[in-house]
Amino acid sequence: MKRFFFFALVLGTIAVACKQDPGDTNKPEKKEPEPEAYTPEDWTFFDQGWNAAKRDSFWFVTQGSRVMPYTWFAALEEPTGENPMFTPRRMDDLGYLPAPVSTLNPKGLPVGFALDTDKSTGETFVGFTCAACHTNVVKYDGKAFLVDGAPALADFVGLYDDIVTTLVSTRDDADKFDRFAHKVLADKYDDASVNQLKAALASLAADSELRQSTAALPDHYPSDFTSYGRLDAFTNIENAGSVLALDMPGNGNPAIGPVSYPFLWGTHQSDVVQWNGSASNIPRSIGPLVRNTGEVVGVFGGLKITKPEGKPKVPLLPFDYASTANFPGLIALENLVKTLKSPQWNDTNGNLPAVNPELVAQGAVLFGKTCAGCHQVVAMEDQLLNYKSKMVPIGKIGTDPTTAMIALTNVAATGILEGMKVEILDGPVMADTMPAITIPVNGVAGLLAPMLIEMMQEKSHGEINMQGHSRGVGHAQDEPTAAPNPSYKARPLNGIWATAPYLHNGSVPNLWELLKKPEDRVTEFWVGSQDFDPKNVGFITNEGKNLFKVKHQGEVMPGNSNGGHVYGTGRTDEEKWALVEYLKTL
């Protein structure tokens, strides 16, 4: 049967003209970018189908992610000083976009950082929402364009390192903790409250260290391997289940398969998502909620799977499943994403150089011959229609196989879940060791069980069919693409011009480089710049926040290969420039 309990981590930056020679493959020299003061009100917006209210909702509606209490976030200091840790400047340096105070953002948090209030305790937490990883800014010729749904160039690993470092230093430094406690407790500061706060801080610091060490890279990997614009979301979701949900330290996998954050327009309309096509949107009545629940589990959704002392909280379930996932918020966010359209190069609000109509016409013909076999062409008026994805085996596409392979090779012990069906009421029975992804799949099934049981009761008039329950939800003819394993998804290229760097692992800086033969592509380039290069179509590469390197110690680094995807690389330069011109118009 087709599985739909698979999901994705659907987890800003900007751009200016580049004077680089498009044929220059020399190592770029580092330039220190001049600090540029700008305010969120300077942003210009493309017409992507959203008004200001929808945009604000996407940025700040909670999905239930809880990194830490907000009062802690505001009170924590730099590890070696007394200055605040999470200042707007520091968050901006990490690639997270500063945003103005609003009704949904009363604390002036960066785009994609949401407040989540516990209904029972009244305590407010800060956590992530979709926009943190899927919002970008493109700067060109004096204008800054915010692009909703575009891949962020943020450094999540750097941010999490900051979180762990400041929590640990506050725990271990008596003076630092005392200042922290006075800020957090204010007029409620007393011995009992201080001791309670100290215990809570120690617990979060330990959990954070565990999360960090579980995903830590092997010793021979460079420290900046993940860095700006990439994250191994898949492994982080796996570890949230196999380690944190089951409370089994040592049961995780290193995050060795970072990918660029995918762009969100067209996500809801696809039958499968994730670069490896593992997250199903089918059946569409529940599929998007399933994958988004998995996403929030991976970004501090607090999944716990425990054996109850008495009867389980939900009948028919052998274990208790708990999480801070906010289902109304997840549904609201998905309803926004389903209406999001791609940014258009020739948007009337923009100021990008006009395209050459003759080159566009030539490029359209070449695209039909070279690219359309994998990448569908979707007209603007059809962007909100559902489509079937094209999955390309890695042996054919030839790009770095690491991401596709970890979904098949990462394994974990199942602990208390051994002997249970993967999807609780359906699916294979879990052995003592299983593919690691099956554990968060089981967790998401447990979280959604009450809703699914209610749906099944409605369809069977009160009687629950324990076998093949997922077949009864949705439409039989609406099945997800049967993907060959391992493989990558080739999606429609609407708005592709605003989504650099390219390939699933962000190993190619711009469209011009992508059309070069793999052996001629640059092997080092700066990432993190917000300045746009409209000729080569990508962000400028001679300055930025981190130097991306294909090779490490003279060898291609697994996960960083810029090889493969040879389509169009045999064309003449004139034909390639025509293709680039056409791609601007999609």
Image (cartoon, rainbow, N blue to C red):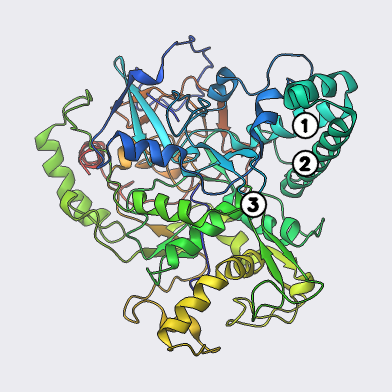
Labels 2 and 3: the sequence-earlier one: 2
Residue placed furthest toward the front: 187
Q: Secondary structure at mark 3?
A: helix
Residue drawn at 70 percent across, 14 percent down: 83
Marks 2 and 3: which is nearer the front? 2
Amino acid type at circle 1 is Leu
Q: Are marks 2 and 1 in contact (CB under 8 Å)?
A: yes
Q: In the rendered image, which residue does mark 1 sit on?
A: 167
Q: Secondary structure at mark 2?
A: helix
Quote the CA–CA distance across marks 2 and 1. 8 Å
The vertical placement of 550 against 302, above or below, is above
* Category of crowding for the residue at label 2, using alpha-carbon neighbours closer than 10 angstroms: few (below 14), some (14–19), many (at least 20): some
> Is residue 385 visible to us here?
yes
Residue in the foreground of this view, choosing between 346 and 98: 98
Amino acid type at circle 3 is Asn
Task: Indicate the position of residue 176 as horizontal and vertical percent values.
Answer: 83, 20
The vertical placement of 309 against 81, above or below, is below
Quote the CA–CA distance across marks 1 and 3. 20 Å
Quote the CA–CA distance across marks 2 and 3. 18 Å
Amino acid type at circle 2 is Leu
